[in-house]
Image (cartoon, rainbow, N blue to C red):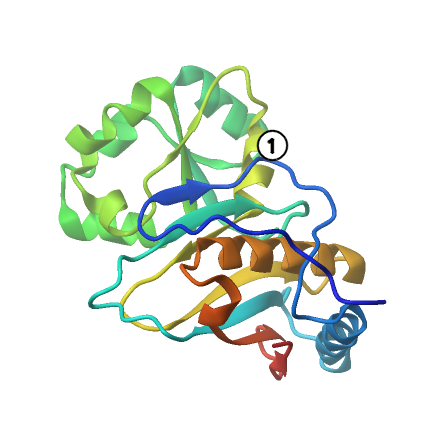
Amino acid sequence: AGPWRCGASPCLHSEQRVAPQRQGPAAMSKIQADYLKTCVEKVFTGTQDRKRKFTESIELQIGLKNYDPQKDKRFAGQVKLNHVARPTMRICVLGDAYHCERAEQEGVDFKTADGLKAFNKNKKMIKKFAKQYHAFLASESMIKQIPRLLGPGLNKAGKFPTLITQQEPLSGKMDELKSTVKFQLKKVLCMSVAVGHANMEHAECIDNLKLAINFLVSLLKKNWQNIKSLHIKSTMGKPQRIY
C-alpha cells in the first residue's frame, strides 16, 4: 500500500476546534500504510506476550517542534474517533430526576443537586470528587447550577461536564465521550492521547490513529512541519516510532 494523501488542512492557532461527529476512512500523508500496520501489530503483540490484570490503553505520543509555548498562541481541539478508545473510562452523571433514574438503571454513578450541595463548596472534597472520574455528563438544568454549587473546581480540573439532553440515550452519549480525544498545547512540546485499547481490532485502532493524527496536523500552524515525532505504545509496552 502506498502513502495516504491528505488535502490542505486549515491552520488553527488558538481557538477551540471540534471535528465533525463521524469521519470516513482517514487518508494521511507522511506515514506508509504498511509500516503503520506493522508498528500497531508489534504494540498489540506486546500486550498479548505479557497479559496484565487490566485492559491496556493504546496511546499516541506526540513530540512537536518549531513551537514556542511562551510566544505562540496555544491550540486546542477535540475529535470523535470512529471506535471507542477508552472503554473503562469512569463517568459520573450530574443529573435531574430523569437522568439520575436512567443512570441508576444502567449502573452508572450519579449525583443529584442535593448530592452536590452536600459538598458545601469544600474545595478539597470537590477536588477529590473530580479525581474519581475521567469525565462528567450533566442535565441542562444541572449544568447551569454547577458554578454555584461547586465553584470552579471541575473547570480547573479540565472536567467541566458535557451536556446531555433527554432525547439522547445515556449509553450513546457515554460512548461518544469514550471515543473523543482532546489535543491542547500547554507549557511543553509533548502530549499523549489514548486512541485505542488492547482488546480492540487492529484495523479499528489504525482507523482511530489516522483520524487522530490527521486532526492534530490540521491544528498545527505549519501542519506536518510542526511534528517532530510520533510514537504509539500500550500502557506498559515499548514505544514504536511511526514518524
Q: Residue at x 30, y 57 (%)?
A: 74
The extreme front residue here reads 8
Image height of 141 relative to 30, above or below: above
- Foreground of the two, 126 or 72: 72
Image height of 164 relative to 198, above or below: above
Q: Would residue 73 be found to the left or right of residue 226 on screen? A: left
- Foreground of the two, 227 or 107: 227
- Residue annotated with mark 1: 171
Q: Residue at x 62, y 51 (%)?
A: 7
Residue 201 can be seen in this image:
no
Give percent across and percent down for residue 119. Answer: 20, 39
Q: Residue at x 63, y 53 (%)?
A: 211
**Rendered image quadrant of residue 117:** top left
- Foreground of the two, 238 or 21: 21
Q: Would residue 143 be found to the left or right of residue 208 on screen? A: left
Image height of 169 relative to 118, above or below: above
Across the whole image, how many numbered discs are drawn on residues? 1
SS class of the residue under badge 1?
helix
**Rendered image quadrant of residue 120:** top left
Quadrant containing the C terminus in the rendered view? bottom right
Give percent across and percent down for residue 150. Answer: 20, 37
Give percent across and percent down for residue 39. Answer: 73, 77
Q: Looking at numbered disc 1 in the image, what kind of residue is underneath it?
A: Ser
Task: Rate crowding at label 1 as few (under 14), some (14 to 19) or many (20 or more) other CA atoms within 10 Å.
Answer: few
**Rendered image quadrant of residue 67:** bottom left
Residue 19 can be seen in this image:
yes
